[in-house]
Image: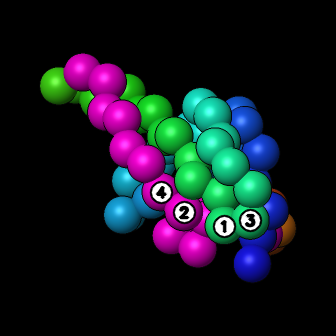
Amino acid sequence: MASFMVGDEVIYQDNRYIIASRNGEGPYTFRLLASTPQGTQVAWANAHELRPIASYLNSRDDTSDYG
């Protein structure tokens, strides 16, 4: 399971959020915030429900895209 910290960007229910706070020990409960055209979205999630943003973690050979 990935380790998450306050300030990390994550995917929760197919939407991008930032972790605003963490509550408790063990299976952490995270407070998530997202900015949308409809306003701020707030959600609570456990660590097993979150995914890191893969594009930040996986390298991609895109040199040919700029040639």
Asked whether the residues under the numbered discs 2 and 4 touch, taking CB atoms below 8 Å apart as contact, a structural biologist would say yes
Quadrant where the N terminus sits is bottom right
Residue 18 x %, y %: 57, 38
Q: Earlier in the sequence, mark 4 or mark 3?
A: 3
Check disc 4 and give the amino acid type. Answer: Ala
The residue beneath circle 4 is: 45
Instruction: Indicate the quadrant where residue 19 lies.
Output: top right
Q: Earlier in the sequence, mark 2 or mark 3?
A: 3
Asked whether the residues under the numbered discs 1 and 3 touch, taking CB atoms below 8 Å apart as contact, a structural biologist would say yes
Residue at 47 percent of width and 57 percent of height: 45
Give left or right: position of 18 versus 22.
left
Q: Which mark is residue 37?
A: none
Check disc 2 and give the amino acid type. Answer: Asn
Label 2 vs label 1, nearer the camera: 1
Quadrant where the C terminus sits is bottom right
Asked whether the residues under the numbered discs 4 and 3 touch, taking CB atoms below 8 Å apart as contact, a structural biologist would say no
Q: What is the C-alpha distance between the residues marked 2 and 4?
A: 4 Å
Name of the residue lying farthest toward the left? 38
Q: Which mark is residue 46?
A: 2
Asked whether the residues under the numbered discs 2 and 1 touch, taking CB atoms below 8 Å apart as contact, a structural biologist would say yes
Q: Earlier in the sequence, mark 1 or mark 4?
A: 1
Instruction: Indicate the quadrant where residue 59 lies.
Output: bottom right
Q: What is the C-alpha distance between the residues marked 1 and 3?
A: 4 Å
Residue 42 x %, y %: 36, 35
The residue beneath circle 1 is: 27
The residue beneath circle 3 is: 26
Residue at 38 percent of width and 44 percent of height: 43
42 shown above or below 67: above
Check disc 3 and give the amino acid type. Answer: Gly
Residue 6 x %, y %: 72, 37
What stretch of residues is rendered in magenta? 39-58
Check disc 1 and give the amino acid type. Answer: Pro
